[in-house]
Image (cartoon, grey):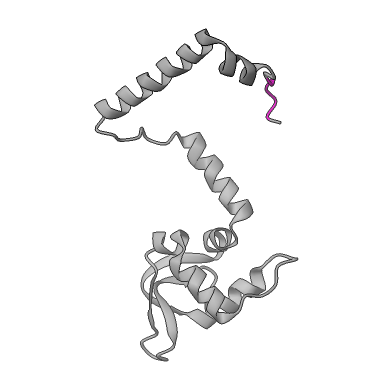
Amino acid sequence: MNGRAVDRGLRGRLTTKRAQQETVLAWLVQGATSWHQSDCQLPAEPPSITEATRLWRESTDLIYAFVEERVESAPERHLEMEKLRQDFNDWLPPPHQPWGKQTFAERFDQHDAMRALGAVRSQHPKTRRSAFKGVALKFE
């Protein structure tokens, strides 16, 4: 799995051995106490977790991977929805099929990667077509 030894007897010890159960309970209470003492705030995410999450999202989340590679923040610009959809469909790796207009618009409009760049659904000021304000394609 991850290169570490697997303890196949752990589940049995945790369900039958009182000393292990008390140790786990003490660990839980200590964690809950620390959490409450820090005003119920989780500690900062370690950089290794942030990086592992980014790599995982790039390999599994098509929109995230596309936005990371092809879209940039551009606060004063407008990117027409259809132009973005065409670029996305051209970018899609096999065996994925092109996305339709409705599916594309709904998923991109709600996606954290677009919001993180400051994208807001609007109309293009010149063409009046559906667009995202605040982003542009990187290679335009």
Name the residue nearer the viewer: 67 or 31. 31
User: Percent position (x, y) of residue 116?
Assistant: 40, 59
Q: Examine the structure image and report whether residue 98 is included in the region drawn in magenta.
A: no
User: Percent position (x, y) of residue 71?
Assistant: 50, 66
User: Percent position (x, y) of residue 17?
Assistant: 56, 10
Task: Report whether 125 appears left or right of 56.
Answer: left
- On screen, residue 138 above or below 21: below
- The residue depicted at 36 percent of the width and 32 percent of the height is 43
Residue extent of the magenta highlight: 2-6
Secondary structure mostly seen in the magenta stretch:
loop
- On screen, residue 54 above or below 117: above
User: Percent position (x, y) of residue 76?
Assistant: 34, 74
For this orientation, the residue located farthest to the right is 95
For the N terminus, the quadrant is top right
- The residue depicted at 59 percent of the width and 47 percent of the height is 56
* Residue 44 appears anywhere in the view: yes
- On screen, residue 99 above or below 9: below
